[in-house]
């Protein structure tokens, strides 16, 4: 959408807001906040509280404003990363109430993945034109389980993160896939050690509410989910100039205001360091074998509202993502709410954290995206604007791998396969 089309869309939407006023279908204060967003102004946290609590009859106009704000900065391009998912280990020191990824050492399927298995997955990804190797793993299981510690010791490692570093380096050198690691909370030294073998890294904030860590809460038994520790990891990544992904998990018992608080916590860190490249809005999915098996999942409208508010909180300067496999029938709705990225999608591996939710085929994602008038573009795990405008955030050791993969705009050469 060009600038003139955007300008006309803003004019039309402003008139629609006025018409809604006149027909008493939009509260005046809500309309003022939306007008402010259309003018490119920052909204306050108090105003974001008002938006997140808006009546669902006003959701359509909220989404329309968010969509226009997205278009004014991101245009009509929606991105995704073609990846393989490598679950380095599914043992974890945390015990989140909603997770069925983790395994106890004696459970069937518990493992620390061998180098040969890791390489086999990465090579399959290379053959399928993937560019990202997503390493997802349980957090420091050796600190909870002697079995995990002993298994790592037999492999020649003191801890999971030491093994992760070597696994990332192996994948780079043997396949040229670019690692993106989600390894839980880490110290600054641990992050620095992984920086040189990761194009980007990530840690879901999930929520800043300490209340969710109380007795009976989803994070009661998860030291690594303490908000202060997660914020400290994200801040350390900023101090180290690591391109970073974070986001929120919606539907685990948080209050609407706590969602807004979490968005502003992320915004403050990005304002200080400029290292956060995307905010993921992920919906909770109830898993049969977990303590939260009967917990109500968030509605599509709830997720759309959070997406729209996130877009207006961050304005035009952030990539907002939803995982397409967790809401497979709602692509149109989420595009209308203001996302501009589908995240990592794998033609090779399943989503090991949400195995019940298969990835869409990339041709399907392309079809539904283009049907709405958008263009689907393949990206690396590090975003185009970081490659072009923040080259100092790219590890020197990986620049020779990154540069040949991208075109003049920072997207993957050759487009979509």
Image (tube, grey):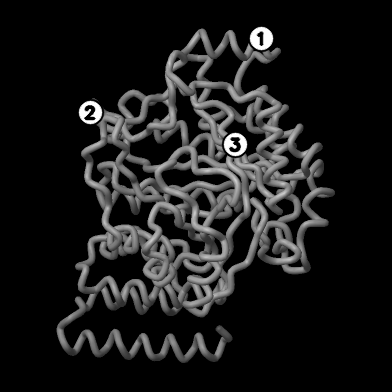
Local secondary structure at mark 3: strand
Measured in 3D between alpha carbons, the distance from the residue under mark 3 to the one under mark 2, in whole angstroms, is 31 Å
Identify the mark at residue 154; answer none if there is no mark. Answer: 1
What distance separates the C-alpha of mark 1 from that of mark 2? 37 Å
Name the quarter where the N terminus is drawn: bottom right
Residue 294 drawn above or below residue 36: above
Quarter where residue 89 is shown: top right
**Mark 1 or mark 2: which is in front?**
1
Q: Residues within 10 Å of mark 1 (few under 14, many from 20)?
A: few
Dot 2 alpha-carbon crowd within 10 angstroms: few under 14, some 14 to 19, many 20 or more = few
Establish if 303 lies above or below 125.
below
Query: Can you identify the residue that label 2 sits on?
Result: 216
Q: Mark 2 and mark 3 in contact (Cβ < 8 Å)?
A: no
Residue 2 vs residue 33, the one in the foreground: 2
The residue labelled by disc 3 is: 86
Q: Do the numbered discs 1 and 2 sit on residues whose CB atoms are within 8 Å?
A: no
Relative to 47, 403 lies left or right: right
- For label 3, the crowd category at 10 Å Cα-Cα, with few meaning under 14, some 14 to 19 and many 20 or more, is many
The numbered disc on residue 72 is none
Residue 47 located left or right of residue 120: left
> What is the x, y in percent for residue 109?
48, 23
Is residue 5 positioned above or below 45 on the image? below
Q: Residue at x 52, y 65 (%)?
A: 365
Residue 115, how many percent across, how many down?
69, 26
């Amino acid at each position: 959408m060009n600038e003139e089309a955007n300008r006309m869309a803003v004019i039309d939407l402003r008139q629609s807001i006025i018409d809604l006023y006149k027909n008493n279908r939009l509260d005046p204060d809500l309309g003022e906040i939306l007008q402010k967003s259309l003018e490119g102004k920052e909204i306050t946290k108090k105003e974001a509280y008002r938006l997140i609590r808006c009546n669902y009859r006003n959701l359509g106009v909220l989404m329309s404003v968010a969509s226009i704000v997205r278009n004014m900065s991101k245009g009509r391009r929606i991105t995704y990363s073609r990846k393989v998912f490598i679950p380095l280990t599914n043992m974890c020191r945390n015990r989140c109430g909603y997770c069925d990824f983790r395994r106890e050492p004696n459970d069937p399927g518990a493992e620390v993945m061998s180098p040969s298995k890791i390489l086999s997955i990465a090579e399959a990804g290379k053959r399928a034109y993937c560019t990202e190797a997503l390493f997802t793993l349980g957090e420091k299981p050796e600190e909870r389980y002697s079995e995990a510690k002993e298994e790592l010791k037999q492999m020649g490692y003191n801890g999971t993160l030491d093994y992760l570093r070597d696994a990332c380096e192996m994948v780079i050198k043997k396949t040229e896939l670019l690692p993106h690691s989600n390894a839980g909370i880490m110290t600054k030294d641990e992050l620095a050690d992984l920086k040189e073998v990761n194009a980007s890294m990530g840690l879901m904030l999930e929520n800043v509410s300490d209340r969710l860590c109380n007795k009976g809460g989803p994070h009661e038994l998860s030291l690594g989910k303490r908000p202060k520790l997660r914020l400290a990891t994200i801040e350390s990544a900023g101090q180290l100039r690591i391109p970073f992904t974070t986001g929120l998990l919606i539907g685990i018992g948080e209050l609407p205001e706590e969602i807004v608080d979490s968005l502003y916590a992320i915004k403050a860190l990005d304002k200080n360091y400029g290292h956060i490249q995307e905010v993921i809005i992920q919906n909770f999915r109830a898993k049969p074998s977990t303590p939260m098996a009967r917990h109500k999942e968030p509605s599509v409208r709830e997720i759309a509202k959070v997406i729209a508010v996130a877009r207006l909180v961050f304005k035009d300067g952030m990539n907002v993502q939803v995982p397409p496999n967790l809401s497979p029938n709602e692509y149109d709705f989420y595009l209308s709410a203001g996302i501009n990225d589908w995240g990592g999608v794998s033609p090779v591996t399943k989503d090991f954290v949400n195995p019940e939710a298969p990835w869409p085929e990339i041709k399907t994602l392309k079809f539904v995206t283009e049907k709405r008038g958008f263009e689907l573009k393949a990206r690396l795990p590090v975003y185009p604007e970081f490659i072009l405008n923040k080259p100092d955030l790219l590890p020197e050791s990986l620049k020779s791998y990154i540069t040949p993969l991208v075109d003049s705009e920072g997207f993957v050469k050759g487009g979509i396969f």
